[in-house]
Amino acid sequence: MIRHEVRVHPSAAALPPERQLAWKLAELAAVPAIERDTAELVAARIIDNAGVALAAINRPPVAAARAMALANPRACGASLFGLDPALTVAAEWAAWANATAVRELDFHDTFLAADYAHPGDSIAALVAVAQQTGRDGAALARAIAVAYEVHVALVKAISLHRHKKDHVAHLCPATVVGIGRLLDLPVPVVFQAVNQAVHLAFSTRQSRKGAISSWKAFVPGFSGKLAIEAVDRAMRGEASPSPIYEGEDSVIAWMLDGKDAVYEVFLPAPGEPPRAIHETYTKAHSAEYQAQAFIDLAIELRRGLALANIAEIVAHTSHHTHSVIGSGAADPQKYDPEASRETLDHSLPYILAVALEDGAWHHERSYARERARRPETVALWRKIRTVEDPLWTRRYHDPDPARRAFGGRLTVRLRDGREIAAERAVADAHPNGRAPWRLPDYVAKFRRLTEALIAPAEAERFLAAAEGVLRLSAAELRRLNPALPAGTVTPHRPTGQGILDWKRVPSL
């Protein structure tokens, strides 16, 4: 790995492009190949994305995004999850719709470091561009691995949430570099596209605060669409604002740590294969990642626990968990039975209450309105709070991946004064967990989520294609997104409720 120091430079310094972080990221588009175990993990994440997308296929945000995409048909474009692969739309709109489907249940991969990330959010855009431009599976796998490399490097180095910026600002440039690798674009072209992507991708964390809305699901689709458009513009010879990171009026100076900030970004040396995807991890439960270990712990604890005897539960955890999904967020919505699914997904007290009562977690039943309103659940829910523990904050940021932790300790105080304590550092499915996930686990998750939706033959075709991604021809890649039986996806046509579907007024 090569260390790149990133700091603000005055305009008079005329920082050459080759010394800018955007250029260093763009250089990763020249990565020649990936290793076989990396390709296997790429296949696992393609399968993971498809499973959670199909499970969400008829949820309102997914249907809305799909309707918008279907208003932009394109012959030989890109396909949409669940629909006949012969029905294609423009790649940027396929990215919009498919990424929304993947993100809706908050049930796919994650990486946590200085910032938060869902690196798999780039895959939908990369598949869409690959389909529209006739790339094969090997090219797609390389592109996905490169996008992960950029995303993980930025998340390790630059905290966005500290300044209340949403993590799309790292996702979008990562997707751009992945597209650059996919299309074998020259570094100067990718550089200009990265500049535009970073310039336009900054938004606030209000999308994950307070009354969290469906926009949280749309963010990766917005990012993928923006990334494709940024690359398209750069391919036409157009330039973008730069230095986008180091400029005296740019993002570091005014949106991040300020003009005196110094960041260290570590990127692969020339010829070094991308392996950052191995540091990422998926979810066994449909909930915010920092709740995963607590769900596993709650399911285990409930076996010997009389819930009626609980006086209070305190979750001792990291600053991140306490302030984002815990009591430290100071969001009353996190204790509100009428809160949106997106808000409940970001409420550790709610998640703990339901996991303790049910001994399981389900992507639909655990968030049902009648489930959240259950009086005994509300009573237990309001006995649960979180506190920041410096020990868990240090472990969250531990430079040693073997010691890094995203869980915490539960202290259950009973009515008779007794206390029960237990802890879980990482989720069971985490690479360092009790049952680390391998490819068969991803396949099992896909089958579990889609068995009532997909025809068995189509499931087997898709799984074989994904697992053999390196061998897929361009024609086979065009059918990578699994299709569902006719009538399963409803409604699958434009609804006519938006501007994109507005009927043309006849000439007078």
Image (cartoon, helix red, strand yellow):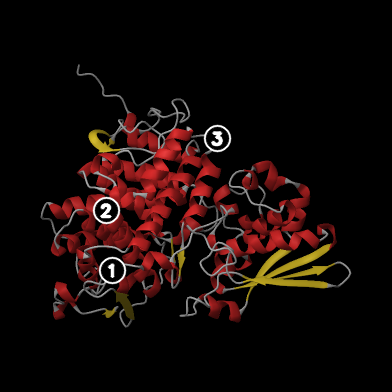
The secondary structure type at the circle numbered 2 is helix
Q: Position of residue 128 (x, y in %)?
A: 29, 45
394 in relation to 86, above or below: below
Residue 252: image x %, image y %? 31, 73
Name the foreground residue: 176 vs 67: 176
Outermost residue toward the right?
A: 416
Secondary structure under the numbered disc 1 in the rendered image = loop
- Res 266 seen here: yes
In the picture, measured across the screen, residue 335 lies left or right of residue 164, that is right
| Label 2 or label 3, whichever comes before in sequence order | 2
Q: Secondary structure at mark 3?
A: loop
Quadrant hosting residue 65 = top left
Q: Residues within 10 Å of mark 1 (few under 14, many from 20)?
A: some
Earlier sequence position, callout 2 versus callout 1:
2
User: Which residue corresponds to mark 1?
Assistant: 273
Q: Gap in Å between the C-alphas at discs 2 and 1?
A: 14 Å
The answer to whether the residues at label 2 and label 3 have Cβ atoms under 8 Å apart is no
Q: Residues within 10 Å of mark 3 (few under 14, many from 20)?
A: few
Report x, y in % for residue 424.
63, 70
In the picture, the quarter occupied by the C terminus is top left
